[in-house]
Image (cartoon, rainbow, N blue to C red):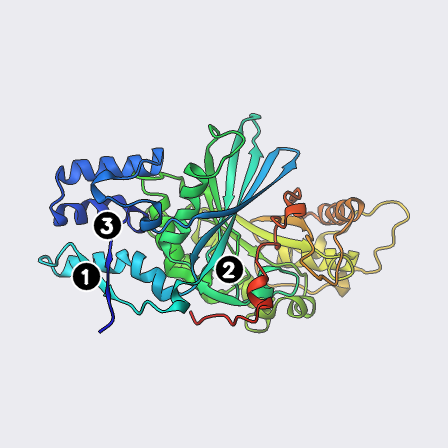
Amino acid sequence: MPPEVNIPLNPLSMTGEEFAQRWKRAGIPGGRPRALEAYAAFYREGVLIPELKLDERALGIGAVVRTHTSESNEGTVLKFTQRVPKSLATALASAAVTSAVERAEHQPDASASLSLPVHATAAEVATVETESVVIPMVGRKRELSYTICVSSQVGCAMGCVFCQTAQMGLLRHLTPQEIVAQWWAARHMVQRPDANAPIDNIVFMGMGEPLDNFDNVVKAIEILTDRRGPALAMRRITISTVGRVDGIERLMEQVQKPGWHQLGLAVSLNAPSDSVRSGIMPINRAWNMGELRKRLCAWGSASRAHLCLEYVLIPGVNDGPQHAAELAAYVHGEEFENRRAIFGEGEEPGFDDAQVARYPGASLRGLVNLIPYNPREQSPWRAPTEDEAERFMQWLRGLGVYCKRRRTKGRDQMAACGQLGNLEYRRAGKKPLTK
């Protein structure tokens, strides 16, 4: 018989209400009031709960293995990694409290000491690392705050050719506990230059495709927005996807639920046409840009949250004037018919409106976020120059597209957009594990 491993009462894996229910069921002194007090102190002050007699490791908060910093025009960018079990089975043995809670709700007499059989093999005690980035942001009032970019998987299965993470392949999904632990570590473990500035924005733009790990990501957000715990505002959380249409449809159902209507959505578009997008993003072969656009129009009707179209600008791939016109047509849809480009003196765009495909439906209500390409290791492409990025943005604005440019932060430490992922796992010949 395999050994049994006790699953602890873990605040990282459950909402405050779930935590209080299990605390009471376990007969721990103080009941519900003490449980909620301990839960709040754990998240807001980083105070471990003495009644549980569990340290960070026992709670499943991965040790911070490495930190890297670099300076930006708004402050210090901090990238950190945390060690987690390579085996999902091992992670679930210590973190699958959500399913345990659900079982207990249907079995009122269930013991508070829950257990799960696991095989403690050498492969399961091996570790990999999550990667997270804490990014300084200076707002309109010149006040500093931080955004944390979290990972939802170790590696990624989407295969985008310009992305560092894609070169790893998918090793495994992260549990809700491991996702929430990234925020907890950023708040209470790593040293930030201004520890008093809040981390009040979360973007699921780290390693992995969030909608490929849908249930765990949704559970993590439920915990992060719990008013008894982290109490983050839903409007300050954004999920970024490569364009999984099935995942967007599930997310549309989720945002209809109370408290979820302001969840942000970002879509990595990165190309103006199917021919270009299919060449750099394999997901486009499953759901083309027309199918994706239909869901994005529906998202605008179903959600009150913002929509962001992310466009990684890659020299020689998607940065020409024709690309700008095609992207404008995609954004505006039928409204593009009467729009004309405004180009600089002496520039020859080399196209006219008749050459640009039209898309049925209204204009997409959102922002095009222009991201200068951050080269991955052994990339066949270089980063665009400042002039090239500025020129493309002006083309889009001349075509009536609402767009902004994302300022590059963390490129020199492999912490910028598209650069997360430790390729050593693949170089050592280690194959990705199953989901």
Task: Give left or right: position of 212 versus 41.
Answer: right
Viewer-proximal residue among 418 and 294: 418
Q: CA distance from mark 1 to mark 2?
A: 29 Å
Please identify the quarter of the rendering in which residue 98 is found: bottom left
Q: Does any portion of residue 138 appear in the rendered image? A: yes
The residue that appears at 25% across and 71% down in the rendered structure is 2
Residue at which label 3 appears: 9
Task: Give left or right: position of 202 versus 338.
Answer: left
The residue that appears at 51% across and 59% down in the rendered structure is 208
Q: Does any portion of residue 255 appear in the rendered image? A: no
Residue at which label 1 appears: 103
| For the residues bearing labels 2 and 3, Cβ distance under 8 angstroms | no
Task: Give left or right: position of 352 versus 263.
Answer: right
The amino acid on which the numbered mark 2 sits, given as a three-letter code, is Gly
Q: Which mark is residue 129?
A: none
The residue that appears at 65% across and 65% down in the rendered structure is 161
Image quarter in which the C terminus is found: bottom left
Residue 131 screen position, x and y as percent: 51, 52
The amino acid on which the numbered mark 1 sits, given as a three-letter code, is Arg
In this picture, is 139 found above or below 366?
above
Residue at which label 2 appears: 208
Viewer-proximal residue among 25 and 367: 25
Residue 147 screen position, x and y as percent: 51, 40
Residue 338 screen position, x and y as percent: 71, 53
